[in-house]
Amino acid sequence: MIQIISTFWLRYIHPRLISLIATIGIVGLTSCLLILFVVAKLAEEVLEKEAFAFDTSFLLWLHQFANPSLDNLMLAITSLGSPTTVVVVAALTLGTLWWRHYRVETYIFVLTCLGGLILNTGLKLFFSKPRPQLWTLLISEKSFSFPSGHALGSMVLYGFIGYILATHYPKFSQIIYTLAVILIVAIGISRLYLGVHWPTDIIAGYSIGFLWLMICITMLKLQRLRQGQSLD
């Protein structure tokens, strides 16, 4: 029995595991597992209708800094993660990738965006968590709260665009990744400032978006590997 298990491991599991680790790295794989654990814990609490004490206290603490200037800034930032902006950015990116004949990147980008949309819509309907109503809101949101679609969508969209730009322009990779992180974080903060999401919604949105992003990037790397390209 042990010999059978050992043979199966060496022939089928081990090569794929080594390939996966070589593609995303030990740190990447470990990060994904930790994030998966966090998402599972958050989902468990939401399903059990448990309230996170820091959710309300953090939003009320953040709201004390509200002023007209910040209101306008946060409204502008949050619009960068709105469906209209996301569709425009995705369409421009898709057109550019196709025009530059980056066929593999084009197909994976479409899969990335569609997967992010399905995850966001499906999870919101599944958990059906109401949005916070702690003060008079500047914007009106009709969908459910968990996870944050802005956080998930910005992580998937801008994260993938950042990765593509960084791989094609490696000299500027640090700047590209830094700008992408700033943009993604700013969108999440804007949702908290505007009071339309709980902090746990943002955490879950980022986490789920990151996991899906890593899956899509891994698929892209493996496809490049099959085509004999550099993994970068």
Image: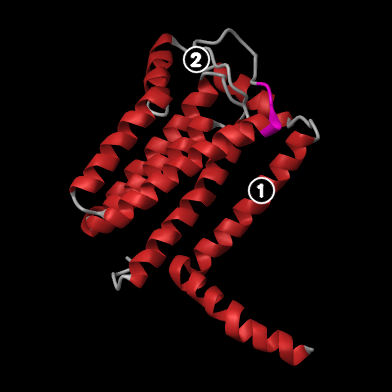
Residue at position x 55%, y 10% in the image: 137
**Circle 2 sits in a helix, a strand or a loop, which is it?**
loop
The answer to whether residue 173 shows anywhere in this view is: no
* Highlighted magenta segment, given as a residue range: 126-130
Q: Which mark is residue 66?
A: 2
Quick one: which residue is furthest to the top in this view?
Answer: 136
Look at the image and tell me in which quarter the N terminus lies. bottom right
The answer for how far apart the CA atoms under marks 1 and 2 are is: 30 Å
Residue 169 locus on image (x, y percent): 22, 55
**Circle 1 sits in a helix, a strand or a loop, which is it?**
helix
Q: Nearer the viewer, residue 98 or 177?
A: 98
Answer with the quarter of the image where residue 128 lies. Answer: top right
Residue 195 locus on image (x, y percent): 57, 19
Q: Judge left or right: residue 199 versus residue 22.
A: right
59 up-or-down from 31: above or below: above
162 up-or-down from 117: above or below: below
Residue 198 locus on image (x, y percent): 62, 27
Residue at position x 28%, y 54% in the image: 103
Identity, as a three-letter code, of the amino acid under mark 2: Ala
The answer to whether residue 196 shows anywhere in this view is: yes
Residue 26 locus on image (x, y percent): 52, 69
Secondary structure mostly seen in the magenta stretch: loop
Q: Judge left or right: residue 194 versus residue 123.
A: left
**Which color scheme is applied?**
secondary structure
Identity, as a three-letter code, of the amino acid under mark 1: Val
Q: Alpha-carbon neighbours of circle 2 within 10 Å: few (<14), some, or many (≥20)?
A: few
Of pointers 1 and 2, the one earlier in the residue sequence: 1
Answer with the quarter of the image where residue 48 lies. Answer: top right
Residue at position x 51%, y 71% in the image: 21
Q: Alpha-carbon neighbours of circle 1 within 10 Å: few (<14), some, or many (≥20)?
A: some
Q: Which mark is residue 38?
A: 1
